[in-house]
Image (cartoon, rainbow, N blue to C red):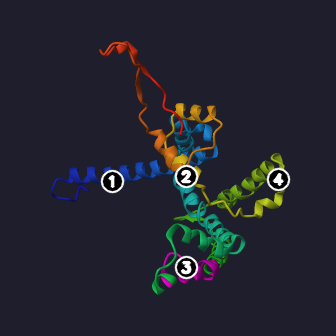
Amino acid sequence: MNQIAWVPWLWAFLFFAMLFLLGISSQFGLAEVLCTCIYDTFPSTKNRHLSVASCVCFVLFLGGVVMTTKAGIFYFSIFNDYCASFALLILIILELILVCYIYGIRNYIKDLRSMFGPPKNIFGKIFGKTGWYFIIVWCAVAPICISVLIVHMVIDQLKVELKYGSYQFPDWSMYLAWFLSVVPLFAIPIALFANVIHFRAIKKPLKDLACVREDWGEITANESKSSISPASDNDVELEKSHASPPPSSTTASSNLYKIRPIEISSTTSDAWNPSTVTARPGKSH
């Protein structure tokens, strides 16, 4: 930056500001993903955003402290080469097998078309979001290519010595590297074990773990209406207090926003008396 003749300090400031913003934006994205997973897994933490985010950032900070030591560049090299590459390919091919051959590619395409709609022309049937091009890639091309990459990666990592520049890593570092490669895969047996315990607790057969509910993606009209129509406490109490059949969806939604009438009691005098005005709750229809 000092070689720039025109305002070198400005370009140096912009360069390091770019590095800072790049790092902090990546930090926000990673922390938000982890926090969202925690919120979805443990719903009781949804109202504790500050505590959850602080714990996540603190754990990530502890994991990054080792990178700031004198040997940090060597640990970073191991993490960079072995942390995500092997496990990512394994997870991708397992996901392809699960979706295409266990869940069924027909069921998956049916789900996609329920969201995107059916293809409208020949081009859409071949290259559309649910066309034959993606079906062939998911079922045949991608699994074959990823399998070849996995075999090549395993052979390459077994033959190539772990080095950084001219420095030769010790033998124990290879065990650390392979451990980092398989750590992300631990989530699969852990999730399976947790689901087995959950199904036994609710006394459901374990075979249901591999079964797909036919109505998993369906939402009834009443559930959809209740999710978008705000109902007050008075409406809930009013519904519980009457044993009459439930009103139609149109009538129910209109009652939520109906202005409650004001009744003026009749008096012997023609003059209007404010003390005789009483509010009467709206009647149910």
Q: Are marks 3 and 4 in contact (CB under 8 Å)?
A: no
- Give the numbered dot on residue 233: none
**In x, y percent, where is residue 13?**
27, 49
| The magenta segment | 126-144
The reply to whether residue 52 is visible in this rendering is yes
Q: Earlier in the sequence, mark 4 or mark 2?
A: 4
The residue where tag 4 is placed is 204
Q: Are marks 1 and 4 in contact (CB under 8 Å)?
A: no
- Report the Cα–Cα distance between label 1 and label 4: 54 Å
Residue 163: in magenta span: no
- Report the Cα–Cα distance between label 3 and label 1: 38 Å
User: Between tags 3 and 4, which lies in front?
Assistant: 4
In this picture, residue 193 sits left or right of residue 225: right
Numbered label tally: 4
**In x, y percent, where is residue 253?**
49, 45
What amino acid is at disc 3?
Phe
Mark 4 Cα-neighbour bin, 10 Å: few <14, some 14–19, many ≥20: few
The residue where tag 1 is placed is 18
The residue where tag 2 is placed is 224
The residue where tag 3 is placed is 134
Mark 3 Cα-neighbour bin, 10 Å: few <14, some 14–19, many ≥20: some
User: Between tags 3 and 1, which lies in front?
Assistant: 3
User: Between tags 4 and 2, which lies in front?
Assistant: 2
What amino acid is at disc 4?
Lys
- Report the Cα–Cα distance between label 3 and label 4: 36 Å
Q: Is residue 241 above or below residue 125?
A: above
User: Between tags 3 and 2, which lies in front?
Assistant: 2
Mark 1 Cα-neighbour bin, 10 Å: few <14, some 14–19, many ≥20: few
**In x, y percent, where is residue 224?**
55, 52
